[in-house]
Image: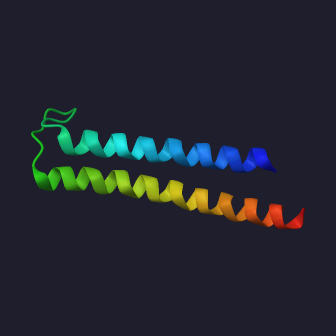
Amino acid sequence: MKFRWISWWITNIIWFILFAVGTVIVWTREIDGAGVTQTPILKLVAFLVLLIAFIILIIIQVVWLFLNLKISRNK
């Protein structure tokens, strides 16, 4: 039981760090990989794409949380 909770927390911390690093990269870069100069609008679009990807991961983490809670109550 304890391993499930520890792995859940470690996974959440890793996702949070990756999201923070990705956000900093998106907002601080001047030119993207295709050579396009980043305007505030393009930075916002890139951030929204990053946010949508992480919302999917958040949904998976919430499902995992509910499974952990249900399993913990049964024991």
Q: Horizontally, is 16 left or right of 40 in the view?
A: right
> Which residue is located at x 74 percent, y 59 percent?
68
Location of residue 46 in the rendering, given as x and y in whole percent from the top left corner: 26, 50
> Which residue is located at x 52 percent, y 45 percent?
13
Please determine whether, in this image, residue 56 is positioned above or below residue 28.
below
Q: Which of the 4 image quarters holds residue 35?
A: top left
Q: Which of the 4 image quarters holds residue 22?
A: top left
Q: Which of the 4 image quarters holds residue 11?
A: top right
> Which residue is located at x 49 percent, y 45 percent?
15
Q: Horizontally, is 20 left or right of 64 in the view?
A: left
Tally of marks: 0
Please determine whether, in this image, residue 68 is positioned above or below residue 11.
below
Residue at the right extreme of this rendering: 75
Q: Horizontally, is 31 left or right of 20 in the view?
A: left
Q: Quadrant of the C terminus?
A: bottom right
Q: Horizontally, is 47 left or right of 68 in the view?
A: left
Location of residue 41 in the rendering, given as x and y in whole percent from the top left corner: 14, 56
> Which residue is located at x 14 percent, y 35 percent?
31
Structure colour scheme: rainbow
